[in-house]
Amino acid sequence: MIVICEPQCREHGHEKLNSGFIYGLRLAYPQEKIIFYADITHIRVIKKILINDNIIINNIEYIPIKFRGSFSIIGMLTYYSLFKKMFSNVVATGGNKIFFLSFSPTILYIIKKLKQKRKFLKMKFTLVLHGDFENIADKRYRPIVPLLPNKPIIEKIRQTKLTDLPRKGVRFMINHIITPWQPIFTKLFPTKKILLWKHSVDFKYISLSPHIIVNAEEFIDVKKLNIYTVVMPYVFAEPTHLPNNKDVKFAIFGNGDSFMLHNVAVQLSQKELKKPYEIRIIGMDKRGTDGFPNITCPGSGEPLTRGEMEKYAQDIDIFLILYEKNRYRLSCSGSILESLSYMKPVLHFNNDCINTFNKQDNPIGICCNTIEEFVNIMEDIIENYQAYIHKFQIFRNNILKLRKEFAIENSVTIIKDSFTW
């Protein structure tokens, strides 16, 4: 029996990654029953993603769970009760292992506290590392991500439809009541300290890119922590043909970086461009783009389904990845895997994460060191679009090679090793 738990994500959070791990675990353990614990909204999305990717997972049971944010006492008590019941169910069925698709330091603390109980002493855990792992670095290395200011609350209320009020009310509660407690709990439960506290051979971790291990060695003993590397297990979409556009179409796919996009848009608007172009936001964050007619956002700031995201990506020539050098040093952005999946070259900043995939001996895009260089290359692509089409095709051919290298099937052995005791 393979027990998998997603204790944090709701709806579309990590949907491609989590469905990829479920598929990878099925390939690693083809005869075992899978039990998947997650929020009901995430379960629905996972089922749709698997259908969309033509993946059939037999002998799987979905068990809905309810949880709160881990940055409060009530939230921690909720997780304690939830995990205690989950662990008891696993032990009762003769199992002793759980594969956690994500965790926070407070969640890991609760897992380790429960493991000290006699009933759970033989429990073993594999946990996937995400953004919290960035916090093991010294303060001087931690990325500071500047954000554009939000619109005044009164203006937001005026622009909100009555039917959207319940959903936006929940989002407001999360952003303004729950999230502000996060810095307090980050100090109470520092990532590095919790990783090392009560550590044993019964805990294994998975990083999502080799650059994470290289950078982490400066701050923590990665061998002692039993960290394996499974490059983000994405189920890639079917290869597509080169877009047939009259003018170039760029896109931000996923979360993006509103602050950097705004600055790029400002500098690009100051160029005396003769050719038209489009920058399409295939995601939710369109802050800072008002007044730039070349920037479009099909979702109007609302979540898009995976099918909608794929549709809006079809005619895009190149993805823009706007993360600077200080971002994703100890974690991995899904943006680069999305570009591989949809056969899109990338224009990006010099960044350890993206450089892992865009290598000189097999380039899949163009790397820039400054925003001025980035904008100048965009200008050149806009004005000389036809001259770049051949280069884009070379990048696409190289993407096909990379897709073969990072196919989930090639990670099955490591996935199995990370969940074998």
Image (cartoon, grey):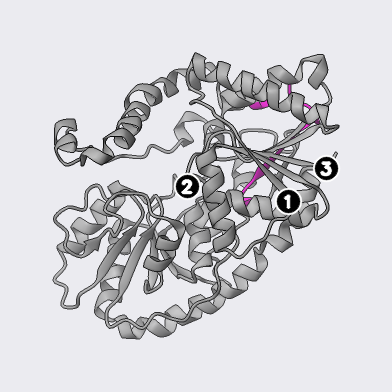
Estimate the spatial distance between the alpha carbons at disc 3 and disc 1, rounded to whole Å.
12 Å
Q: Earlier in the sequence, mark 2 or mark 1?
A: 2
| Image height of 244 relative to 191, above or below | below
* Amino acid type at mark 3: Thr
Looking at the picture, does residue 217 appear above or below residue 274? above
Residue 155, quarter of picture: top left
Other residues around mark 2 within 10 Å, as few (<14) / some (14–19) / many (≥20): some
Q: Is residue 254 left or right of residue 111?
A: left
Q: Front-most of 379 and 16?
A: 16
Which badge, 3 or 1, comes first in the chain's sequence?
1
Residue 332, percent across and down? 54, 49
- Up the image or down, 240 lies above or below 184; here it is below
Residue drawn at 85 percent across, 38 percent down: 421
Other-residue count near label 3 (Cα within 10 Å), few / some / many at <14 / 14–19 / ≥20: few
The residue pinned by badge 2 equals: 12
Q: Which stretch is magenta?
A: 195-210
Three-letter code, disc 1: Leu
Residue 171 image offset from top left, x and y in percent: 34, 33
Please count the marks in the image.
Answer: 3
Judge whether residue 154 is colored magenta. no
In the image, what residue occupies the spot 83% across and 53% down?
A: 31
Q: Which residue is denoted by mark 1 in the rendering?
A: 25
- Provide residue 413's location: percent of width, then percent of height: 79, 55
Residue 332 showing in the rendered view: no
The local secondary structure at tag 2 comes to loop
Rendering coords of residue 335 (x, y %) = 47, 56
| Direction from residue 305 to residue 135 in the image, left or right | right
Query: Is 260 or 368 nearer to us in this picture?
Result: 260
Kind of element beneath mark 1: helix
Q: Which mark is residue 334?
A: none
The mark nearer the N terminus, 3 or 2, is: 2
| Discs 3, 2 touching: Cβ within 8 Å | no
